[in-house]
Amino acid sequence: MNLRNLLPILVFMFFGTMLSGQQFSGGLIGGLSAAEISGDRLTGPNKAGVYAGGFVNTYINKKSSFQMELNYIQKGSRKNPDTLDNSNFYLLRINYVELFLHYKWDFAERFTFEAGPSLGILLKSYEEADGQILTEPPFKTRDLSGNVGLFFSLTQRWRFNVRYSNSILAVRPHSNGQTYKWNRGQYNEVLSFTLHYKL
């Protein structure tokens, strides 16, 4: 199936679930991502981006729930030129729409632990080094990631979330094509800081 046809189906399923019953609650997500690409030889996270979307969740008992999210996330990497170490300018932007399915556990009055997978669909990529636009190697169209995070309840409607995300599969091969054991290429790493508003 073409990715352009898959995205509207995901959006329809997401919002259809949100409206399907009273046992579900939903809301909006907004914040920032701090991203890097493992294997690019740059220390990070060094690329800031937008993190925005929506969520639905349902409780299966008093402390456990499942949450589904559909988010727009800007990932990538960045290096500003530095005369001290003779480093050059580098910029990588990778934009995804990402579908999350997380298990959540309310382990304290205001704190919730979360963990689960997400599937990202690549919308656009842009890579530049010293004014030269790079196109090789290309990025894969999907990004399967594992995520862990922590919620802190500010009020009944507002929650603050810190989440770490790492690609399970490489999002593209190394430029030289080499692999070593579990290192099959480059992987997205994202540390996000978001606010969740319950509608």
Image (cartoon, rainbow, N blue to C red):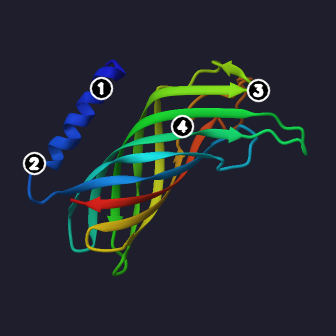
Q: Amino acid at mark 4?
A: Leu
For mark 4, give the secondary structure: loop
At which x and y percent is residue 50? 47, 45
- Distance between the Cα atoms at labels 1 and 3? 36 Å
- Distance between the Cα atoms at labels 2 and 4? 33 Å
Q: Residue at x 39, y 47 (%)?
A: 52
Q: Amino acid at mark 2?
A: Ser
User: Of the residues tagged 2 and 4, which is closer to the observer?
Assistant: 2
Residue 160 visible in image: yes
Left or right of residue 142: residue 138: right
Q: How many marks?
A: 4
Residue matched to label 3: 130
Q: Quadrant of residue 92?
A: top right
Q: Earlier in the sequence, mark 3 or mark 4?
A: 3
Residue matched to label 4: 169
Question: Please, is residue 178 above or below residue 120 in the view?
Answer: above
Residue matched to label 1: 6
Residue most toward the bottom? 109
Q: Residue at x 58, y 26 (%)?
A: 126
User: Of the residues tagged 3 and 2, which is closer to the observer?
Assistant: 3
Q: Earlier in the sequence, mark 2 or mark 1?
A: 1
Q: Earlier in the sequence, mark 4 or mark 1?
A: 1
Tags 3 and 2 in contact by the CB under 8 Å rule?
A: no
Q: Amino acid at mark 1?
A: Leu
User: Of the residues tagged 1 and 3, which is closer to the observer?
Assistant: 3
Q: Which mark is residue 20?
A: 2
Q: Earlier in the sequence, mark 2 or mark 4?
A: 2
Q: Earlier in the sequence, mark 3 or mark 2?
A: 2
